[in-house]
Image (cartoon, helix red, strand yellow):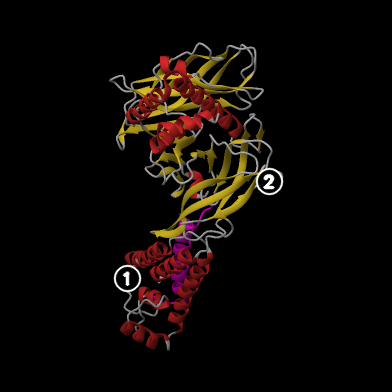
């Protein structure tokens, strides 16, 4: 009896999954006073499929937004939430390195997959809200729930830094020099050692496999960094790194509201890999001028490489990767400091360097030189 | 008059008796009020169980199987402690004993129900630890078996970054738009 009912329910669910209209699956919310307006919205190749007793929704959302402000847009962040599916999680899609003039349209794509039970409540599954818009003059619009103002400001500063670097090469060594610099960037990215990292929040579940032990951070220090790391450690158990805690000192006379420590791990052969970053902000983090505070996170990073093989963490290195002052100004390391610390081959390229490399790869050095000359 | 045994009556009440035994039991019930009372007792228990169908998240098949087993166990226990065989003696099936047997079976069923009753539990998603991971096609947040993934299907080269505050980001150039896109998924 009950098995017949289950078969019937599964059949109904299958019909539901196939017939479910996707038109109302996504809701785009832009505030009335938003500097961006929604011109069009398309669900493209979105589709629903079944996986056992669950439904998989592949949402391919194409938006066309219009810059209705009087300022050039440099970056946009959209907050994506699917509260029914993952109440504790949210997502964002950011498009940095833009150069959208007033009254110009530009596209944003959101590719989202939801795996959920066949039967759930109605209403839009996905809500997309504007979190922030960054303009050319670093002014900002938006609720900033994801701290996108800082993120986009940092990306724009990295973009200016990296464009300046490549423009200086173009000026000094011409197209051939630019080509050579691009090839070096491409080779660095191709050879950059990569790890697979899983992130879980909250207190770690005790691991019986390997005994926990604290490992101290070694620190790299940049001469112009406004914040200095003093000491820090994390609990290491096999391929898991937990609860990083780092003491930092504000070397300036300005209040700091955000510090991000970039976190490298090394294997027994001394090879370094980028594991992640340890940020600190919020009311609990108070770094007044000249004071000391602690950067800490209750998080577990599970690190593996080569498609899942556990990575034995032999050492850890940290350096200050980003600082935001109370007035919203952001500090990032300069390119020379990263190069002299031999970090360019370990760190991921900035979004702008990614864009320039892609442009070079697809259209060649002349198109890249033309692009650099626009800024 | 020879009475059917109680397990047959219980199975008859649940319509689980084979056709021949059912026919024989029906013939007996037509002329035996004591056994009809017992069957009604079993049926009322069955109806109470059916009324619980509205409650969510009960493994009904398992519960029904356990209850049948409990009934049989109770009957078997009764047989074990009985002083003398009961070849259909009227004294064995006296009204007081029948009521006592029904009461004990119902107590057994009630105990089974109590032990198996649905208890308010927090949603599975809340108790499960959410895990963020980068996959070949995107970033996936897995929360109690339900997942939210941001995909980068059109990307040739993707750079990942993990934040210890509970985030993973994936940066890539969208081949359709030519724009750098940074997908981030956060876990709280």
- The rendered magenta stretch, by its main secondary structure, is classed as helix
Local crowd at mark 2 within 10 Å, few (<14), some, or many (≥20)?
A: few
x 52%, y 63%: residue: A21
Q: Is B155 one of the magenta-colored residues?
A: no
User: Which is in the foreground here, disc 2 or disc 1?
Assistant: 2
The residue tagged 2 is: A31
The kind of secondary structure element at disc 1 is loop
Q: Residue furthest right?
A: A33
Q: Is B93 one of the magenta-colored residues?
A: yes
Q: Chain of mark 2?
A: A
Q: Which mark is residue A294?
A: none
The residue tagged 1 is: B84
Local crowd at mark 1 within 10 Å, few (<14), some, or many (≥20)?
A: few
Say which quarter of the image contains residue A308: top left
Looking at the picture, does residue B77 appear above or below residue A327? below
Q: Chain of mark 1?
A: B
The residue stretch that appears in magenta: B92-121
Q: Is residue A354 visible?
A: no
Looking at the picture, does residue A160 appear above or below residue A8? above
Residue A23, percent from left and from top: 55, 60
Residue B38, percent from left and from top: 45, 76
A368 or A334: nearer the viewer: A368
Residue A184, percent from left and from top: 36, 25
x 52%, y 59%: residue: A120
């Amino acid at each position: 009896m009950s098995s017949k009912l289950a078969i019937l329910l599964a059949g109904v669910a299958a019909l539901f999954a196939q017939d479910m209209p996707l038109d109302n699956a996504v809701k785009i919310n832009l505030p009335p006073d938003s500097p961006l307006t929604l011109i069009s919205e398309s669900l493209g190749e979105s589709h629903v499929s079944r996986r056992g007793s669950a439904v998989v929704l592949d949402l391919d959302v194409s938006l066309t937004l219009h810059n209705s402000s009087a300022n050039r847009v440099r970056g946009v962040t959209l907050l994506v939430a699917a509260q029914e599916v993952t109440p504790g999680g949210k997502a964002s899609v950011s498009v940095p390195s833009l150069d959208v003039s007033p009254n110009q349209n530009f596209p944003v794509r959101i590719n989202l997959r939801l795996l959920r039970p066949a039967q759930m409540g109605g209403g839009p599954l996905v809500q997309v809200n504007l979190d922030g818009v960054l303009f050319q003059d670093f002014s900002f619009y938006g609720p900033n729930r994801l701290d996108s103002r800082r993120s986009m400001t940092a990306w724009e500063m990295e973009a200016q830094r990296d464009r300046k670097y490549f423009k200086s090469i173009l000026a000094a060594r011409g197209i051939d020099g630019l080509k050579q610099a691009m090839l070096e960037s491409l080779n660095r990215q191709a050879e950059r050692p990569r790890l697979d990292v899983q992130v879980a929040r909250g207190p770690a579940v005790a691991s019986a496999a390997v005994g926990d032990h604290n490992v101290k951070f070694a620190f790299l220090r940049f001469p112009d960094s406004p914040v200095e790391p003093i000491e820090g450690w994390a609990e290491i158990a096999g391929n898991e790194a937990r609860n990083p805690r780092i003491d930092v000192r504000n070397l300036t006379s300005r209040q700091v509201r955000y510090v991000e420590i970039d976190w490298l791990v090394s294997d027994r052969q001394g090879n370094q890999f980028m594991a992640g970053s340890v940020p600190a902000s919020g009311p609990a983090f108070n770094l007044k001028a000249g004071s000391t505070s602690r950067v800490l996170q209750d998080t577990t990073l599970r690190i593996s490489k080569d498609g899942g093989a556990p990575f034995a963490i032999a050492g850890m290195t940290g350096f200050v990767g980003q600082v935001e002052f109370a007035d919203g100004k952001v500090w990032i390391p300069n390119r020379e400091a990263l190069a002299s610390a031999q970090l360019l081959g370990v760190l991921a390229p900035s979004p702008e360097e990614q864009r320039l490399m892609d442009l070079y790869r697809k259209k060649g050095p002349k198109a890249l030189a033309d692009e650099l000359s626009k800024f | 008059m020879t009475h059917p045994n109680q397990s047959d009556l219980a199975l008859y009440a649940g319509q689980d008796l084979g056709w021949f035994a059912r026919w024989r039991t029906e013939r007996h019930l037509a002329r035996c009020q004591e056994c009809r009372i017992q069957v009604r007792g079993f049926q009322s228990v069955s109806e109470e169980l059916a009324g619980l169908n509205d409650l969510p998240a009960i493994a009904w098949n398992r519960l029904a199987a356990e209850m049948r087993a409990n009934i049989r166990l109770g009957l078997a226990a009764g047989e074990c402690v009985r002083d003398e065989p009961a070849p259909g003696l009227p004294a064995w099936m006296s009204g007081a004993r029948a009521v006592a047997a029904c009461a004990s079976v119902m107590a057994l069923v009630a105990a089974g129900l109590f032990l198996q009753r649905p208890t308010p539990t927090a949603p599975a998603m809340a108790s499960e630890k959410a895990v963020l991971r980068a996959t070949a096609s995107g970033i996936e947040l897995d929360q109690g078996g339900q997942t939210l993934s941001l995909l980068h299907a059109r990307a040739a080269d993707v750079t990942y970054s993990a934040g210890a505050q509970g985030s993973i980001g994936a940066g890539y150039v969208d081949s359709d738009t030519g724009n750098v896109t940074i997908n981030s998924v956060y876990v709280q």
